[in-house]
Amino acid sequence: MHRTPHMRTQRMGRMLITGANGLLGKEITRYFSKGYKVLPTDLAECDVTSAKECMRVVGGFRPEVVVHCAAYTDVDRAEREKEAAFTLNADGTRNMALACREHRSLLVTFSTDYVFDGASERPYAEDDPVDPLSVYGRSKLAAEEAVREVAPHFLLLRTQWLFGAHGRSFISSILERAERGEECKVVSDQKGAPTYTRDLADAVRRLLDTGARGIFHFSNEGETSFFEYAAFLLAHTGWGETPVTAISTSDIPRDLYPAPRPLHGLLSKEKYRKETGVSPRRWEDAVLDYLQTGIEGGHA
Ligand SMILES: NC(=O)c1ccc[n+]([C@@H]2O[C@H](COP(=O)([O-])OP(=O)(O)OC[C@H]3O[C@@H](n4cnc5c(N)ncnc54)[C@H](OP(=O)(O)O)[C@@H]3O)[C@@H](O)[C@H]2O)c1
């Protein structure tokens, strides 16, 4: 069949991205720019705390998919700025969900292991009971509730310990400390799995391909503590001589880091595996891949 350019444009789905200047938003923009007509937005183009603006931007672009990455992510500051955290995370997500409902867009968004209390002995499944310990965790849970209540079609990925080429992460702060010759004191009793933003973007693509809906957990495979993670990073970047000391969560100065964190936030990827037929790669492989190829413009 002869295809006109117009038909080709129509066949390429439109994807609106919020928080597109952030760690994940930039990677989502890069990853999907090949397969979609992408409209990346951040605060200047679409302030998600404004219901009117969400409606206007979604209505103007009419995307098949909205990938909502905008969020209040400063976990410790959220303890002092509860209203700001809830306004951006809960109200912002509700606004986007309402706009998606109005314009029949699929809403894809992200949540966190912080919705759990971290007391479980085994990795959390999607339907395990939630019980957030922090303001950030409660604001993200309120966002989840808004999505379930409002959006007829959604894909929500709970994830943890993100790192990637386009923003600050645990990796950048450890390597910066090593470069300054500072000792690294790192907690050894908080367990989880690092997640490469590239792998998370790929997971979104796979779930879109299967037509999956609902909540999925995704991180890289395996389990580690922040202490082991730091030691691994230093050993693989030529900073192996940097002193690393294991401390416990109870040693952390509460005035500097007031947010309580889940001690054991590991997420089960079983549902993701069943849906897509693939397992995430191990976190060590993802981190090495990032260290070798993914760093863009240093660690700043
Ligand atoms: N980072 C992690 O380890 C982690 C772990 C689990 C889950 N998640 C979730 O993953 C998602 C992405 O996180 P991230 O780390 O990529 O976040 P991020 O780097 O903090 O990016 C968030 C982006 O949203 C923008 N933004 C702030 N206020 C806005 C507003 N009113 N309207 C529109 N945009 C606004 C921010 O701009 P400014 O920088 O100018 O404020 C920033 O560009 C979030 O849902 C987060 O909760 C992250």
Image: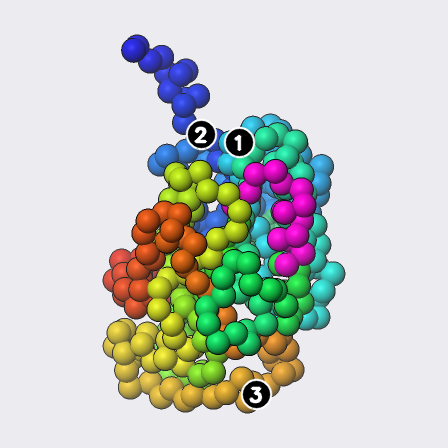
Q: Nearer the viewer, residue 13 or 254?
A: 13
Does residue 250 appear to the left or right of 293 in the view shown?
Answer: right
- Residue pictured at 59% horizontal, 54% vertical: 71
The residue pinned by badge 1 equals 63
Q: Quadrant of the C terminus?
A: bottom left
Horizontal and vertical percent for residue 268? Answer: 44, 63
Give me the C-alpha separation between circle 2 and circle 1: 7 Å
Q: Judging from the image, what secondary structure is the residue with disc 2 in?
A: loop
Residue occupying image coordinates x 55% and y 58%: 127
Residue 150 within the magenta-colored segment of the rendering: yes
Quadrant in the picture for residue 173: bottom left
Residue 296 seen in the current view: no
The answer to whether 288 appears left or right of 129 in the picture is left
Crowdedness of circle 1 by 10 Å Cα count: few (<14), some, many (20+)? many
Q: What numbered label is drawn on residue 13?
A: 2
Q: From mark 3 to mark 1, how far is it between C-alphas?
A: 47 Å
Please name the amino acid that badge 3 sits on.
Ser
Specify the principal SS of the magenta part. helix
Marks 2 and 1, the one that precedes in the sequence: 2
Report the front residue among 146 and 174.
146
Ligand 1 under 8 Å from disc 3 Cβ: no
| Mark sitting earlier along the chain (2/3) | 2
Q: Which mark is residue 250?
A: 3
